[in-house]
Amino acid sequence: MMEILRDDNGKKGQFTATINGEQAGLMTYTWAGDNRFIIDHTEANPAFSGQGVGKGLVMAAVDFARENQFKILPLCPYAKTVFERNADIRDVLFR
């Protein structure tokens, strides 16, 4: 089972995915004001390929944004693709 934790220092943050205690992926973001953040990088450990790690990280960011009324600007190519393919999460996009 995948576990995703968020760490934030007030300027930058990251979501880290682990599976069975091993780091499966990482997504970093940078704050752009008080209520929006930029997803700037997503990576998945090749050992966990095909297990939905990258999408899980993006969805964790979407949940975080919804819970706090934040908006997301996905500059990372992977995150941008997830938003393009899933209309149901675009409510959190910063436009």
Image: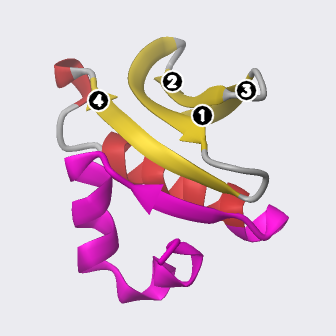
In three-dimensional space, the C-alpha distance between marks 4 and 3, rounded to whole angstroms, equals 18 Å
Tags 2 and 3 touching, CB below 8 Å? no
- Residue 1 in view: no
Residue that mark 2 sits on = 18
Q: Secondary structure at mark 3?
A: strand
- Answer with mark 2 or mark 3, whichever residue precedes in sequence: 3
- Answer with mark 2 or mark 4, whichever residue precedes in sequence: 2
> Is the stretch drawn in magenta largely helix, strand or loop?
helix
Camera-side residue of 70 and 95: 95
- Residue 30 - label: none
> In the image, is residue 26 above or below residue 71?
above
Tags 1 and 2 touching, CB below 8 Å? yes
> In the image, is residue 59 above or below residue 12?
below
Q: What segment carries the magenta color?
A: 66-95
Specify how the rendered protein is coloured.
Answer: secondary structure
In three-dimensional space, the C-alpha distance between marks 1 and 4, rounded to whole angstroms, equals 15 Å
- Residue 43 - label: 4
In three-dimensional space, the C-alpha distance between marks 1 and 3, rounded to whole angstroms, equals 17 Å
Disc 4 packing (10 Å; few <14; some 14–19; many ≥20):
some
Residue that mark 1 sits on = 3
- Answer with mark 1 or mark 3, whichever residue precedes in sequence: 1
Residue type at mark 3? Asp
In three-dimensional space, the C-alpha distance between marks 2 and 4, rounded to whole angstroms, equals 12 Å
Residue that mark 3 sits on = 8
Residue type at mark 4? Glu
Tags 4 and 3 touching, CB below 8 Å? no
> In the image, is residue 79 above or below residue 50?
below
Question: Which marked residue is nearer to the observer: mark 2 or mark 3?
Answer: 3
Q: Residue at x 28, y 61 (%)?
A: 80
